[in-house]
């Protein structure tokens, strides 16, 4: 048996979202004395989303789409580092967290020497400090 | 006369030293962005948008528009020297531009690309200036049903040309509408889809979605790129970049073709500069006395698509400024920028904000001249951008994205949303879901729901109001026909051919 394709899973996920929208919107007024209520528009796009997702799921069973996921580990590792940087803002602030993210990307993702990674990360963080808080008066996270 | 006085007023705004400076910054930044494969104008404009809150709105609009049309000039450089389009709009330029470079005529190709861009770009601005004010006056007669129908038609066009699968494009639009609906309903004060989070009561900021999907998604999708690409050398000296008189004669029709096709395709929502450049390339080849030479390095094959993708900019701004309906990702971001600065793009935008509109038009004339002057002698310098290592560029984009989002709301919750939308943007690219319909759904969702509900209030809840009025009936019928295109094999084959 063939493994379900990416379209199958994305159709399923969007179908779930469509169902959630329908269920939630059903709890709001659809048509009141003053005209359509808050549930009117969401209910219709929820129904459309569910129907189209179903279409996507069914059509994915007939045709097999090939997706090259070979770059996914690099992309997901970078996203993980980016999310870790966002989490670190609370404790160490933007500049050190950003420098660490830059160091990770240069040294780990692009395999550049540690000296290059350290120089780039310090230089970029310093550049951000000079440009945003100093020159533009912008508050950093 | 009204147009002439408006234009004079516009030049008095655009020629102010600070506005000139921002115009220059915009076109240079746009050219650099255009040269760089991967990072496009919507991502750049979205990233810089929060920083423009510190600026005068007219100056900010002049700069952001400069990025938009400047990128079109820059996109040709990589197409010609590297066979890698800096922008999707420059794909058609690769066909003959790169062959010209391989034949030792890189200078002439770059030169004609800049000249065609200038001629067609200026034509696009001229048409914007002539058509936008009367169109805005005409649309004053529109009421809620017509607006709803117009937005539905715009979204249908974007879905039609959003990608191979119209089902996926429609789903992306619906997700955009849902995102736009998150927050407090202004009619009934009901909280919708807020998951009991206080932060979501005021909705999700468009900037967060746009930066996440475009900028962060773009970085994640391009993480495999190593940068520092080897390109064909640019000939030194201005003389080597100027096309010969014969080249100019050969390109005469291409200039006119690119200008007209680019502009009219630009006005249509969803079509965009990529399609415009391919259509004008196709026309050029069809009417040529030597069609067999196309693809081997003919100068008309560079002039026509480059002209078309620049003329498109002026056309694309017309529905955005006069009707408040963006037809592409970039105009959607520009529309959001205007809204964030407190303007209301639509029929009253020009009469209520003459300095902004005419200042923008005048700045586009000036910007095109700047780009011509910059692009001829400075092409070798811009080509150096290709050597910029991606390991410096990508952290920079990630950092600016975070600062941009945080500047808008001072909320760490929005930074988390940014990370989420970044991952969603990457997955959309991998799963072949187009991002333009999503962004347009987010931008138009609120206005579309408002227009629909107001229409139904006018008719005591009867949907017949949408088809009883002739203009909205025609537009909704067109939208329906467009969405039914996949059912007609021949039309769908044309659509897929246009997309390829």
Image: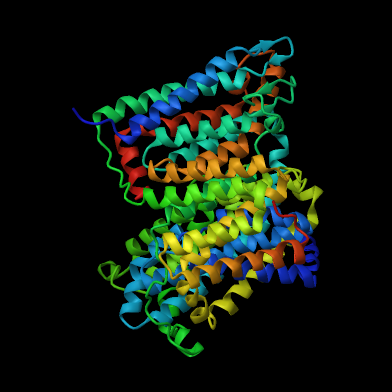
Q: Quadrant of residue B492?
A: top left
Q: In the displayed orientation, state which residue is furthest to the top.
A: A33
Q: In the image, is B382 to the left or to the right of B136?
A: left
Residue situated in front as seen by the camera: B469 or A134: A134
Quadrant location of the N terminus of chain B in the rendered image: bottom right
Measured as percent of width and height from the top left, residue A49 is found at 47, 25
Q: Please indicate, yes or no, whether residue A16 appears anywhere in the rendered image.
A: yes
Question: Which x, y percent locates residue B336?
Answer: 66, 46
Question: Is B485 above or below relative to B192?
Answer: below
Q: Is residue B126 visible?
A: no
Counting from the top left corner in percent of width and height, residue B409 is at 72, 44
In the displayed structure, B332 sits above or below B276; it is above
Question: B466 and B414: which one is in front?
Answer: B414
User: Does residue B474 appear to the left or right of B465 in the view shown?
Assistant: left
Residue B187 vs B390, above or below: the answer is above
Q: Residue at x 63, y 74 (%)?
A: B369
Residue at the (42%, 63%) spot, across then down: A110
Q: Quadrant location of residue B302? A: bottom left
Q: What residue sits 60% from the left and 42% below the top?
A: B416
Taking depth in this image into account, of B86 and B498 the one nearest to the observer is B86
> In this rendering, is residue A108 above or below B330?
below
**In this orientation, which residue lies closer to the viewer: A77 or B426?**
A77
Residue farthest to the left? Answer: A1
Residue B121: x %, y % from top left: 57, 65
């Amino acid at each position: 048996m063939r493994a379900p394709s990416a379209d199958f899973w994305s159709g399923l996920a969007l179908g779930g979202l469509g169902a959630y929208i329908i269920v939630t919107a059903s709890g709001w007024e659809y048509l009141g004395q003053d005209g359509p209520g808050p549930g009117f528009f969401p209910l219709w796009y929820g129904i459309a989303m569910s129907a189209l997702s179903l279409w996507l799921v069914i059509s994915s069973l007939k045709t097999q789409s090939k997706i090259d996921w070979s770059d996914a580990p690099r992309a997901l590792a970078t996203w993980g580092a980016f999310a870790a940087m966002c989490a670190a803002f609370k404790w160490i602030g933007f500049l050190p967290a950003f420098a660490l993210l830059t160091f990770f990307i240069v040294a780990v993702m692009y395999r550049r020497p540690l000296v290059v990674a350290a120089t780039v990360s310090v230089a970029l963080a310093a550049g951000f400090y000079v440009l945003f808080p100093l020159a533009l008066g912008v508050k950093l996270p | 006369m009204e147009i002439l006085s408006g234009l004079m007023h516009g030049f008095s705004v655009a020629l102010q030293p600070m506005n000139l400076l921002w115009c220059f910054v915009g076109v240079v930044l746009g050219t650099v962005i255009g040269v760089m494969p991967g990072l496009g104008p919507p991502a750049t404009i979205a990233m810089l948008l929060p920083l423009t809150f510190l600026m005068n709105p007219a100056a900010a609009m002049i700069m952001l528009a400069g990025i938009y049309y400047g990128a079109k000039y820059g996109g040709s450089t990589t197409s010609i020297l590297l066979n890698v389009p800096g922008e999707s709009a420059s794909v058609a330029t690769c066909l003959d531009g790169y062959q010209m470079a391989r034949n030792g005529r890189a200078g002439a190709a770059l030169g004609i690309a800049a000249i065609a861009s200038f001629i067609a770009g200026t034509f696009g601005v001229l048409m914007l200036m002539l058509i936008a004010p009367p169109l805005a006056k005409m649309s004053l007669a529109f009421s809620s049903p017509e607006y709803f129908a117009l937005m539905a038609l715009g979204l249908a066009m974007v879905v039609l040309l959003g990608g191979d699968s119209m089902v996926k494009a429609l789903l992306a639009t619906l997700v955009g509408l849902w995102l736009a609906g998150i927050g407090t309903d202004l009619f009934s004060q009901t909280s919708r889809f807020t998951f009991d989070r206080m932060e979501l009561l005021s909705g999700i900021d468009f900037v967060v979605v746009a930066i996440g999907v475009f900028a962060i998604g773009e970085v994640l999708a391009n993480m495999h790129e190593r940068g520092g690409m080897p390109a064909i050398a640019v000939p030194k000296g201005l003389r080597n970049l100027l096309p010969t008189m014969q080249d100019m004669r050969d390109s005469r029709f291409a200039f006119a073709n690119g200008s007209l096709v680019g502009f009219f395709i630009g006005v249509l929502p969803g079509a965009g500069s990529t399609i415009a450049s391919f259509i004008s390339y196709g026309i050029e080849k069809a009417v040529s006395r030597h069609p067999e030479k196309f693809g081997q390095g003919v100068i008309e094959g560079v002039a026509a698509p480059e002209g078309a993708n620049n003329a498109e900019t002026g056309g694309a701004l017309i529905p955005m400024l006069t009707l408040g309906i963006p037809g592409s990702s970039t105009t959607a971001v520009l529309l959001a920028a205007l809204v964030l600065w407190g303007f209301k793009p639509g029929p009253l935008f020009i009469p209520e904000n003459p300095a902004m509109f005419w200042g923008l038009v005048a700045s586009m004339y000036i910007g095109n001249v700047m780009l011509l002057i910059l692009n001829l002698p400075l092409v070798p310098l811009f080509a150096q951008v290709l050597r910029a290592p991606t390991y410096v560029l990508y952290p920079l984009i990630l950092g600016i994205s975070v600062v941009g989002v945080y500047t808008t709301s001072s909320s760490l919750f929005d930074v988390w949303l940014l990370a989420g939308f970044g991952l969603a943007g990457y997955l959309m690219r991998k799963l072949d879901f187009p991002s333009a319909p999503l962004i347009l759904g987010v931008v138009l969702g609120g206005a579309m729901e408002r227009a629909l509900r107001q229409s139904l209030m006018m008719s005591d809840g009867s949907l017949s109001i949408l088809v009883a009025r002739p203009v909205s009936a025609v537009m909704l019928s067109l939208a329906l026909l467009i969405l039914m295109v996949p059912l007609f094999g021949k039309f769908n084959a044309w659509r897929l051919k246009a997309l390829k």
